[in-house]
Image (cartoon, helix red, strand yellow):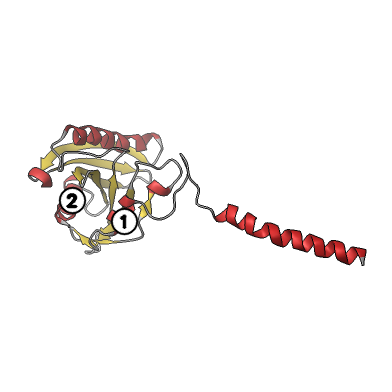
Amino acid sequence: MRRSASVLALLAALAAAAPVALAQKTAAPSGKGEVAAGPSAPALAVAALPATLGGFGRDGEVVDFERRPNGAGYGASLRYTPRSGARAVATVFLYDRGARRAPEGGAGREVAEEMRVAVGEVGSLVRTGRYRSVSEGTEMELGAEAGRFRCATFEVIQGDGATTGDAVCLGVRQGAFLKVRVTAWTPPEPVAAGRMAAGIMRDVLRAP
């Protein structure tokens, strides 16, 4: 009987402790560097983008960088691929690096500075081994007023030896940086990648 009583007491103790353990495991973390519950505002904005942009169709789920540890300011992204079947991939990014961006469009100083960062990020992929080489092409400003944006093109030798045309376009939309990054295998031309990225940017900037 003593042994049965001890077992019953142990089971009762475990039952009482279980809800506490479950609450600790499922409670939403808070504080710096921790992950908040629910999708971030940039993720919701990216999810609301049209299914088709510049002849590219949505391909995959939204990546919510904001909800990763120490991800505040990194926004969210969404991948698109050509409806035509051409071998290319585009990624649309929306982020603010922790501060509201202005003015809308691509004429501001902040866009020029962020473009330098974006170009540097492309070049840095040589050091990581993802690319063998990067040759910078042209940089241009397109559009007008709030629909203005900047683009830069590159010729890239991928890590597997394939040549691609690459481009990055950048502007400000609704107080955040809007960036489109394109890699094109067919055709592997910087100008073609630039046209693809610019077409996507125009459609995003026109979206509600």
Mark 1–mark 2 Cα distance, whole angstroms, equals 18 Å
Instruction: Give x and y (percent) for residue 28.
Output: 50, 51
Which residue is outermost to the right?
A: 1
Neighbours of disc 1 within 10 Å: few (<14), some (14-19), many (20+) = some
Amino acid type of the residue tagged 2 in the rendering:
Met
Left or right: residue 54 compared with residue 97: left
Q: Depth check: give the residue in front, 183 or 207.
A: 207
- Relative to 113, say whether 10 is above or below: below
Reading the image, the residue beneath label 1 is: 44
Instruction: Name the element at disc 1.
Output: helix
Amino acid type of the residue tagged 1 in the rendering:
Leu
Neighbours of disc 2 within 10 Å: few (<14), some (14-19), many (20+) = many
Q: Depth check: give the residue in front, 141 or 100.
A: 100
- Mark closest to the chain's N terminus, 1 or 2: 1
Q: Residue at point 92% right, 67% down?
A: 1
Image marks 1 and 2: residues in contact by CB distance under 8 Å: no
Q: Residue at point 33% right, 53% down?
A: 43
Instruction: Name the element at disc 2.
Output: helix
Q: Which of the 4 image quarters holds residue 56?
A: bottom left
Number of numbered markers: 2
One can see residue 171 in this view: yes
Instruction: Give x and y (percent) for residue 139.
Output: 16, 37
Q: Which of the 4 image quarters holds residue 167?
A: top left
* Camera-nearest label, 1 or 2: 1
Q: Identify the disc placed on residue 192.
A: none
Q: Residue at point 19% right, 54% down?
A: 204
Q: Identify the disc placed on residue 201.
A: 2
Instruction: Give x and y (percent) for residue 154.
Output: 23, 40
Instruction: Give x and y (percent) for residue 53.
Output: 20, 59
Left or right: residue 138 compared with residue 182: left
The C terminus sits in image quarter: bottom left
Q: Depth check: give the residue in front, 130 or 63.
A: 63
